[in-house]
Structures are given as C-alpha cells and as structure tokens.
Amino acid sequence: MKSFMIQGAKIIATGSAIPSFKLSNNDISKIVQTSDEWITTRTGIQERRLLTGADQSINDLAVLASKNALDKISMHPSEIDLIILATSSPNDLFGSASKIQFEIGATNAVAFDLTAACSGFVLGLVTAFQFLQTGAYRNTLIIGADVLSKWVDWSDRSTCILFGDAAGAAILQSCPTSNNSILNFQLDTDGKYSNHLSILYQHKSDILPVANVYQGYFKYISMNGKEVYKFAVSQVPLSILKCLRSLRISVKDVDWLLLHQANERILTAVADKLSISKSKIISNLSKYGNTSAASIPLALDEAVKEKKIIHNDIVVIAGFGAGLTWGTVIIRWQDLS
Ligand code: UT7
C-alpha cells in the first residue's frame, strides 16, 4: 500500500443475514457416511444454515444483510455510491450486484460483482477503500454472500460437511486521514494451485454443428482439503506478519483475530503461529460452517453486536481460499460516535 493518502475510511455499519433452516452434523450423517464426532473434531462445525425454497436466492440474503447495515445508521440507500458484491455463487453469471442495487433502492450507486471465493470480502473491502482514498466516492457498501449449498456435491463427505449459506455487509465511508481506520492491507494470489479448490466449467459433448463451439455447465465444488489446509496455515500468518510489521504494530497489540471461518483448527494454528492468545480469536463457525465470502462480514457483524470489538481495537482480518487467494486487512476499529 502506498503511504500517499488523500482520504481515510472507516466502517460505519455492519449487517448480516442467515437462512432459518439449520442442518446439524447428525442430519448430515443421514446423507453421507460421517459423524457428529468426526465433523466437530476435525472442523469445529456443529451446524450450518442452508437456503431453502425454490423462490429464495443469494439476492435475498444479500439484500437483507445490506438493509440491516443501512438501518443501523438510518442511512438512506440513495447515499450509497458504490456496491461491491463479493460472491462465487451469483444468481446470474453477468452479476447479481445490480439486482441488489435495485432491490435496496441504491439508485445512485454503481454496482458490480467481485469473484475471489473466500477472500472476496477482504478484496472487496480493499477495492472499495481505493475509491474512497482517491475521493471518488463517499459511501460504499461491500457485501460478502455465498450459497455454496447449491454447488456442493451432497454425496461427497469431504466437502458437504463444510459449507453453509449466508451474507454479511459493511458500509465503508470516507473520512479525514486523521480518522482513518483501514491501516494497511496485504493481498496475494498463487494461481499455480487453483486446482486445489474450484467449481470448474465443464464442456458437454454436444457441439454446434456449424463450428467447433462447445457449451457446458459448472461442476460441483472440488477441493483438496489437505493442501488448502497446509496453504492456509503457512501463508496466512506470513501475510498478517508482513502487514503488521509494515505498520510497526506488534502482535501483542492485536486485539482480535478475525479469520475466514473455514476450520477451527486453522484459526487456532494461525493464532499459535503468531503467538496470539486463543481468547482473541473470533469464531462463529460452529453455528454456520464455512460461508465463503460471507464468513468474515458475518463474524464481524456478530462481534460488533456483542460489543466484543470496541473503539480503538486493532482487528486483524484475513481471508483465504480458492484462487488460491489470500489477504489481510488491519483495522483500528472506530465507534460511530
Ligand atoms: O474456504 C476455503 C478454505 N477451505 C479450507 O480451508 C478447508 C481446509 N481443509 C480442511 O479444513 C480439512 O482438510 C478438512 C476438514 C476438509 C478435512 O480434514 P482432514 O483432517 O484434512 O481429513 P482428511 O481429508 O485427511 O481425511 C482423513 C480421513 C480420510 O480417511 P482415510 O483415508 O484416512 O481412511 C477421509 O476419507 O477422514 C476421512 N473423511 C471423513 N470421515 C468421516 C473425510 N471426510 C470425512 C467425513 N466424515 N466427513
């Protein structure tokens, strides 16, 4: 990140939405050969929420989370200048952000989707920050939403136990640099290992008779869990350390570690590697599983509601996942008042 800064930015509201339907580990053990004991021990997940009903989509969750954030500060949607929807499971391959813009009535906002899997919210936050720093926009809405239950192979016990559906949102507003809350970020990608976690496009055998044109569909989630695990516990601490060092902030000064909620063992291993006390880990994955791009804003919203995160706290946020992509944002939390 360049030290040159025109404007600062701070999160002025958060919101979230979860489907009402709960699927417990015991429920899953009726679908595939697994057990509550295995899932809890290996992942920390106890239950997850799934979007049910043919008339419900990711848009409903994203709209609810956005309205939830707007309502908290009584902000009129027309004040939003930019909406970024971080998702890998949009309802429309051309993008779902514009539908959310319409449904919440953010008539003045430009809206687009951003695809970076479980790092999506971090990348969305950093992207929005750029528009605020330059002074181009004042209010941005970043939504992380995923409904991976639609893309999971429910006969594959190594993946179907992990994922849940949710949406989380944050409103990031520009402010004087003296109040800047987004202290630094570090983003990385290594496409060499993209095959470790993917929802791949697959050709069908039919081709257009007049040309060599294929059409196809998207396959289910495929994941090499062991490799993704190793990547997360090795790269995420490095990313966080690099970010902290450039700010000359000691790990001792970190108040909260808010990681992508993939696996309790990953959260603990990253904290251990950084010598950060386990009491500083924000974790809600036992209730929701891995909600991909939604996991960080959902956990952030809960932690703010529960008044865990308070004024001036240093919050280390880090996402990681398919791509492979990973990224850290360090925030000094600021209360509204
Ligand atoms: O959001 C993107 C980021 N994603 C992640 O961070 C996921 C990272 N990876 C993980 O969290 C873990 O690798 C998993 C939770 C996915 C798997 O845990 P693991 O400790 O790495 O298990 P494993 O894949 O090495 O499997 C160990 C054993 C295998 O049996 P054998 O070959 O040792 O006989 C699996 O077949 O556990 C078996 N197994 C299961 N058993 C009961 C795999 N899934 C299950 C299951 N229930 N659901």
Image: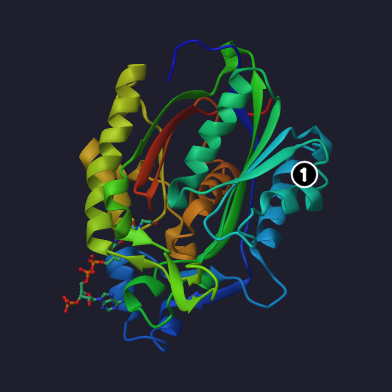
Q: Amino acid at mark 1?
A: Asp
x then y, percent, for residue 81: 74, 32
283 lies above or below 27: above
Question: Who's the residue at 34% across and 48% down the image?
Answer: 324
Q: Nearer the viewer, residue 47 or 262?
A: 262
Q: Where is ligand 1, by quadrant?
A: bottom left
| Residue to which mark 1 is pinned | 71
Question: Who's the residue at 49% across and 59% down the image?
Answer: 291
**Label 1: how many Cα within 10 Å (few below 14, some 14–19, many 20+):** some
Res. 219 in view: no
x then y, percent, for residue 51: 61, 71
Question: Who's the residue at 49% across and 63% down the image?
Answer: 288
Q: Nearer the viewer, residue 307 or 181?
A: 181
**Label 1: element kind:** helix
Q: Quadrant of residue 40?
A: bottom left
Question: Who's the residue at 42% across and 77% down the image?
Answer: 153
Res. 171 in view: yes
97 lies above or below 247: below
Q: Is mark 1 within 8 Å of ligand 1?
A: no
Q: Is residue 280 left or right of residue 103?
A: left
134 lies above or below 226: above
x then y, percent, for residue 204: 46, 76
